[in-house]
Image (cartoon, grey):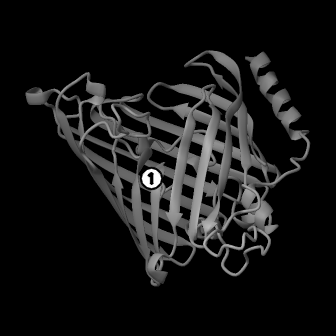
Amino acid sequence: MVYRTGLLVVTLGLLLLAQQAVAIPAFARKYDMSCNTCHAPIPKLKPFGNTFAGNGFQLEGKEPPRYFKDTGDEWLQLMREVPLALRMDGQIAWEPQSTGKTDFQAPWLLKILSGGQIATDISYYFYFFFSEQGEVVGIEDAFLMFNNVFGVDFDITVGQFQVCDPMFKRELRLTRSDYLAYKLRPGLSNIDMTYDRGISLSLGLSEGTSFLISGLNGSGIGPLEQGAFDRDKYKNLMVRVLQEVGESFRIGGFAYFGKEEGVNGTVTGVNSLWMAGPDMSVSLGRVELNVQYVERRDDNPEFLGPLDKKAASRGTFVEIVYTPDSDESRWHGVLLWNWGESDVVLQDYGRKYQTGAVHISYLLRRNLRLTGEYGYDFLNKANSVSVGFVSAF
């Protein structure tokens, strides 16, 4: 015990002596601005960062004049250089009850990102995972965005993305611990609110109200099977309504309706399901409160045909983010609580789960964040401790 604790302390000390990261990500390079303009801290987006992303990664009236090549063709808009950025995270983890090991987990993830304009109001974004938890994952986010269609705040996004992104973006959370309510999958169901392929339409109104509707495969982002990405003949639908009050308060709700056939052809039957729930985000000076609730109903999650067993599932997370010096804060603290239950076994979690996490991070540089996190599984009485880093360059 003393040896393990000492190892963690020494490692954190070495991280604090790390050298300055000398490069900055693609969008900051393009506009000659700090990462802090959009993130506080990396990778969490500020309201300005959300607006910038929602505007097709462009700043109106501030586009660098030499960003595009002069091809002499008014119908061709080519960037002089393809914008690239890298992200690398790592940590040392100690999980005494589950694995009984102290583990060097670096890199925990390593990915290359690219995004920019193909033409005015037409943008793209993607990233490729070279490694996530020791495996080559491939492409996750990859989409094309048509911004301000018909000259109004109407956007069309097509490709693959996370279904939960309009609520809270899992990829941009500060904690190692996940938002588990988005990963509810009872029985053998293949549908959750993480990655999927589809098309999303969003409309923003001047009163701070916005609407979104997404048509989805409902099959995740697995490889081609029998000539198609979709594993069955059904398409799923998600709708979302959001009301913002200034930059300090937002409240919204979503509803998801889907149907799926037996997974990978190994089981039979059809499962019809729906998910719905409210979400809320409140910023009170130095403290931000984020809440999500998900209620789910499946009529045949184990694909038993005439012996089908209906299931009710639900999950929630509550997140509190503390920034003592607002945007300029170098220290950040996060509390995250997850809870969920189901009538049938949830994939990866049993019938119930309840976890908590306490996270502290320090910005050594704008694009290099040192992290420490303590996690606790209330049902299994298991602890986990990690110290590490998040970097982008």
The residue that mark 1 highlights is 164
Seen in the picture, residue 191 relative to 68 is either above or below; the reply is: above
Q: Which residue does the image show at 24% across and 42% down from the upper left?
A: 233
Q: Where's residue 384, x and y in %?
A: 61, 28
Q: Which residue does the image show at 82% across and 34% down from the upper left?
A: 12
Mark 1 lies on a secondary structure that is: loop
Residue type at the position of mark 1: Cys
Residue 53 or 177: which is nearer the viewer? 53
Residue 31 or 188: which is nearer the viewer? 31
Seen in the picture, residue 124 relative to 65 is either above or below; the reply is: above
- Displayed quadrant of residue 194: top left
Q: Where's residue 323, x and y in %?
A: 70, 59
Q: Where's residue 13, x and y in %?
A: 87, 34
Q: Is residue 169 visible?
A: no
- Quadrant of the rendering where the N terminus is positioned: top right
**Label 1 Cα crowd, 10 Å radius (few <14 / some 14-19 / many 20+):** some
Residue 68 or 113: which is nearer the viewer? 68
- Displayed quadrant of residue 320: bottom right
Q: Is residue 9 left or right of residue 165?
A: right
Count of residue discs = 1
Seen in the picture, residue 237 relative to 229 is either above or below; the reply is: below
Q: Residue furthest front?
A: 72
Q: Where's residue 369, x and y in %?
A: 77, 47
Q: Is residue 108 left or right of residue 204?
A: right
Q: Is residue 16 left or right of residue 63?
A: right
